[in-house]
Image: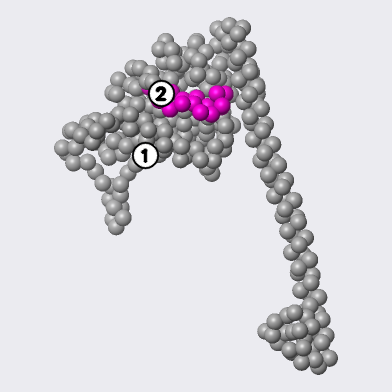
Amino acid sequence: MAQSKYIRFDWAMKRLLRNKVNFGVLEGLLTTLLGERITIQKLMENSIEDSQDKFSFANMIVTNEKQETFWIEIQNHNEYAYFERTIFDISQCLYNYITSKSNCYKVRKVYSVNIVYFTLGHGTDIVYHGKTEFRGIHNGELLELSPFQKQTFKVNEVSQLYPEYYILKVNDFNRVAKTPLEEWIYYLNTGDVPEGASAPGLEEVKERLKLDRMTKTELDAYYRHLDNIVILRDNIFTEREEGRAEGRAEGRAEGRAEGRVEGERIKQLEIARNLKKLGLNTEAICQATGLSLQEVEGL
């Protein structure tokens, strides 16, 4: 893993971005991602424990001036059930705001921002966005809010009431950054800021997340973190390659077994043809070769 002069985002999430003076970094990421200015008001207490290895997992919950909630999570470790766990996390986050059925209308808008450093699902894009819409199964019509609901909830679309999900597959980014969002993906992937970057928040990265601002103790812990990530990725790669090798070996073994079976069948058919030429009756040929009546008659 190449070294840069800036602190990686996943480490900063655990150690630095929880400090209000560094909120500008997170605000820049969210502003770039959502296309509207986001100002973080406060960091919320996270009731969901980081149950995984500390170097592979980090999350944070913040709110903005509109009382919208952002669940931000970073994960380095491969997890096949990541989609399902994301649903659980956001459901629990929503549950914390609903204490009774009577105040359901007060539920906050929640955004789930997932930065993953592993192959998640099957797709070629680097950023995915998901939201909830309801469409008629007969005419494809989009279900809309009534004027009263728009006034009460202060939103224009049903999807604005439901959680929205963003997945940033940063490991798959391997080109020159040309847009503000790509500049952010580049930093998330490499830990470096591209030359001439103008995306909101990256100036704060260059100012506040410099390696030379860390103490020796902090640097030692940070480099251990980088080593752990390298080891984690090597383990994942090794497991994947071993699985492929086992699959190839099993495939070759199955191929040899199938070849033997096919060879035996060819021999049986050849023997049956010869016996048929000698005038042996069909039933006797079946008994001698193990072929079925239909197979012998078809020769």
Q: Which secondary structure lies at badge 1?
A: loop
Give the distance between the C-alpha atoms of the residues marked 2 and 1, in whole angstroms.
Answer: 23 Å
Residue pointed to by mark 2 = 46
Which is closer to the viewer, label 2 or label 1? 2
The residue lying toward the viewer, choosing from 122 and 278, is: 278
Instruction: Give how far across and how far down residue 77 sits, in percent.
Output: 57, 32
Q: Look at 28% across and 55% down and name the residue there.
A: 139
Q: Earlier in the sequence, mark 2 or mark 1?
A: 2
In the rendered image, the vertical position of residue 106 relative to residue 121, given as above or below: above
- Picture residue at 41% right of the left edge, 37% below the top: 88
Expressed as whole percent of the image width and height from the top left, the position of residue 28 reads: 42, 20
Figure quadrant of the C terminus: bottom right
* 174 with respect to 67 (left or right): right
Taking depth in this image into account, of 165 and 91 the one nearest to the observer is: 91
Identify the residue position indicated by label 1 in the image: 131
In the rendered structure, does residue 73 fall within the stretch colored magenta? no
Q: Amino acid at mark 2?
A: Asn
Segment colored magenta: 47-62
